[in-house]
Amino acid sequence: METIKAAGIFAALGHETRLTIFRLLVEAGPGGTNASAIGEQLDIPAPTLSFHLAHLSRVGLIRGERQSRFIHYSAAYETMDELLAFLTRNCCQGTACLPKTAQVDSIAKRRARNPSNATARSKP
């Protein structure tokens, strides 16, 4: 991941509402949820929600898929995976300095722990 792309993702997540939406979709799992359910759960008006969902989609953190009259949103786990790898790449010159992430310090290790992500694409 390039620094400019990571900066755009962080800028998107720097807004409280977008961070809350993204976390909700991560917690929802690969199946995601529809926009109206997100709005109801977070008590966000439809126009405001639409604006934030569009921003998260633009930076690649979520994806939307039309299902009949609704748009179903899910987290883009491969983007989140790339961002985590970008943040921790070559951390502390290769020593284990992050105890909470030691078990998942590479894309391969994270995928090994979560087989449902095994098909996600990533760039070194």
Image: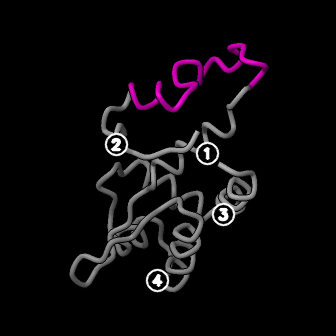
Question: What residue do we see at 43% from left, 65% from top?
Answer: 63
Mark 4 or mark 3, which is nearer the start of the sequence? 3
Boundaries of the magenta span: 91-112
> Which residue in the protein does label 2 denote?
119
In reply to whether residue 74 is colored magenta, the answer given is no
Mark 1 or mark 3, which is nearer the start of the sequence? 3
Question: What residue do we see at 54% from left, 62% from top?
Answer: 60
Mark 2 or mark 1, which is nearer the start of the sequence? 1
> Which residue in the protein does label 1 denote?
83
Question: What residue do we see at 32% from left, 32% from top?
Answer: 115
View extreme (left): residue: 68
Image coordinates of residue 51 in percent, x first then y, are 56, 80
User: Label 2's element?
Assistant: loop
Mark 3 or mark 2, which is nearer the start of the sequence? 3
Report the amino acid beneath label 4: Ala
Point out the frontmost of discs 2 and 3: 2
> Which residue in the protein does label 3 denote?
12
Report the amino acid beneath label 3: Ala
Q: CA distance from mark 1 to mark 2?
A: 17 Å
User: Badge 1: how crowded within 10 Å, few (<14), some, or many (20+)?
Assistant: many
